[in-house]
Image (cartoon, rainbow, N blue to C red):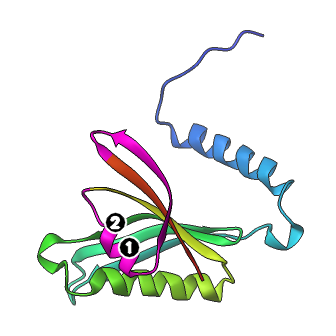
Amino acid sequence: MELHISNETSDTSKQYVRNQLIAFNVQHFPEHLNGRYQEVGLYLKDADGHIFGGLVGEICWNWLEVHLLYVDEQLRKSGYGKKLLLEAEKIAKEKQCDFIKLDTLSFQALDFYKKQDFEVYGTIHNAGGHTHYYLKKDI
């Protein structure tokens, strides 16, 4: 059998790879953590349903990973980012997670996350001319 590499953005192919990796990973985690997966989507909306920001992530085994956190520029420094993180932390605690992890770039929100008790556990320098920070908060 000869195989080739296909460069595509197929949802079906992506789901296959994801499902196979999850099936492999399940074999290596304690049984009580198996099946612990939940997408998290928290959004800032007005009464008409217009979105002004949000937090997108997932609970996986014993942690919550924040993939995206955004607040429209005119609303920054109004406490909404903190409220989104606190709501995510509440969900993580309810799901018995041990920590939250996320990443940010040096021009984004490093100081904000540090004020929310996140600690840097890794960095990559020269990520597009910036520093890429990886942060974690035990809960």
Residue 130's x, y, as percent?
29, 46
Whether the residues at callouts 2 and 1 have beta carbons within 8 Å, the answer is yes
Q: In which quarter of the image is the N terminus?
A: top right
Q: Is residue 47 left or right of residue 114?
A: left
Residue under the image location 27 percent in, 40 percent down: 129
Q: Is residue 17 left or right of residue 122?
A: right
Image quadrant assignment for residue 62: bottom right
Residue 73 lies in magenta, yes or no?
no
Residue 53 circle label: none
Q: Mark 1 points at which residue?
A: 113
Residue under the image location 66 percent in, 42 percent down: 16
Q: Foreground residue, 18 or 63?
A: 63
Say what amino acid the circle numbered 2 marks: Leu
Q: What element carries label 1?
A: helix
Residue 119 lies in magenta, yes or no?
yes
Image quadrant assignment for residue 85: bottom left
Residue under the image location 45 percent in, 73 percent down: 41
* Mark 2 residue crowding within 10 angstroms, few (<14) / some (14–19) / many (20+): some
Residue 94's x, y, as percent?
63, 89
Measured in 3D between alpha carbons, the distance from the residue under mark 2 to the one under mark 1, in whole angstroms, is 5 Å
Q: Is residue 84 left or right of residue 79?
A: right
Q: Is the residue 2 above or below the residue 117 in the image?
A: above
Q: Is the residue 33 above or below the residue 78 in the image?
A: above
Please provide the residue range marked out in magenta. 107-130
Residue 67's x, y, as percent?
45, 61
Give the farthest residue toward the top: 2
Give the farthest residue toward the left: 74
Q: In which quarter of the image is the C terminus?
A: bottom right
Residue under the image location 85 percent in, 55 percent down: 28
Residue 110 circle label: 2
Q: Is mark 2 on a helix, strand or loop?
A: helix
Residue 38's x, y, as percent?
61, 71
